[in-house]
Amino acid sequence: MDEAVLRQRFLGALVGTAIGDAIGADFEGKSAVETAVIEQAADTKPLLTYTDDAHMMIGVAESLEQKQGFDAEHMAHVFVRNYESEPWRGYGSGPPTVFRMIMAGEQWEKAADRLYQSGSYGNGSAMRIAPIALLYHDDLDILREVAYRSSRITHSHPLGKEGAALQAFAIAILVATQPKIGLTSINFLTRLIDLSQLEIYKNKLHSAGALLANPDKAKVVSELGNGVEAFNSVPTAILCFLANYASFESAVLFAASLGGDTDTIAAMTGALSGANLGVEAIPDKWRHKLENREYIEELASVLYEVWERTRKKAV
């Protein structure tokens, strides 16, 4: 893989997450709208401000950088620190409750289980997974393990952990694909289906493949979902990306136009499209007014260097 291409994809995945989040945020919880409405709203805003989705993604990247790899306890405490610093980012009720438990002395691996009897199966761990997918993109076995463990901090239900792993696999495959070879939608979905360990995700991915020929919004929402549950949003983001394979702008606008959990679905779609096309494919009109863009790009560059050092040690 050409170094310049890989760096661009690292940048694209993180910046893409934040831009998708920021563009989808104003439409969260609403019904489906026309993409032109979303585009106009994004284009007229002086600043694209992200929510807890990108805020937690930043925390993941910060922890990976500081520990030169994954350390679950450290990442949990970075989440706590960042939440305390900016609690107004739009966090749902679950993660802050977990954070307060950890602050009160609860062990990180037990806090999420205490909140929900079987753990949360929301999409919170999938929306933030991009940095982990990048760092471990060339070892899918390790990636699965780290995705599960990182999810466990806040979303310990098997469906939540599998959603994080599926989104991570999708990003990793895109990052690692040689530009000259390319990847067809069918091959991409087949690989994800083979990697998925839960039937509900396999079935949703099969449905996504059937919808590609005619991705009608109503059918997408009906068959794949647009809710906060990981199984009702991760496959949807994958469909949004594949249905708009060649355009970051079209992919994110389509994701945000579906209604429901628009910020998270658009954030995950943005991560996928950015990982595939690279940061240069993100429109300047959005990229240049993304909140904290330079810091996010710096994190992506440093993450690439961490990956490079780790790879050389393994050789």
Image: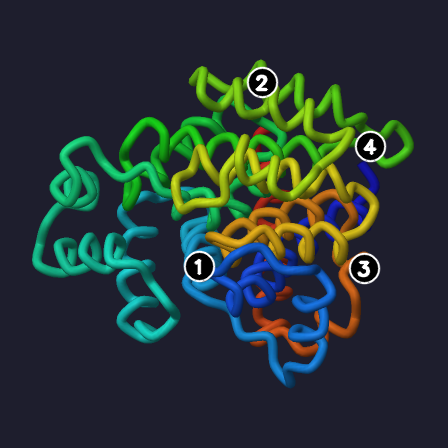
Q: Which kind of residue does numbered mark 1 sit on?
A: Gly
State the SS at label 3: helix
Residue at horizontal 61%, vertical 81%?
A: 47
Which comes sooner in the sequence, label 1 or label 3?
Answer: 1
**Discs 1/3, front:** 1
Q: Earlier in the sequence, mark 2 or mark 4?
A: 4
Depth check, mark 2 against mark 3: the one in front is 2
Q: Under tag 4, what secondary structure?
A: loop
- Checking the image for residue 79, the label placed there is none
Which amino acid does the dot numbered 4 rest on? Gln
Residue tagged 1: 29
Left or right of 151 in this view: 184:
right
Give the CA distance from mark 2 to mark 1: 29 Å
The amino acid pointed to by label 3 is Glu
Disc 1 is placed on an element classified as loop
**Residue at the spot of label 2:** 193
Residue labelled with disc 3: 280
The disc, 2 or 1, on the residue closer to the chain's N-terminal end is 1
Within 10 Å of the Cα at label 1, are there few (<14), some (14-19), or many (20+) other Cα atoms?
some
Q: Amino acid at mark 2?
A: Ile
Mark 4 = which residue? 178
| Mark in the foreground, 4 or 1 | 1
Local crowd size for mark 3, using a 10 Å CA cut-off: few (<14), some (14–19), many (≥20): some
Coordinates of residue 38 in the picture (x, y in percent):
66, 67
Instruction: Locate residue 20: give its quadrant.
Output: bottom right
At mark 2, the secondary structure is helix
Left or right? Give the position of 283 relative to 211.
Answer: right
Q: Nearer the viewer, residue 141 or 23?
A: 23
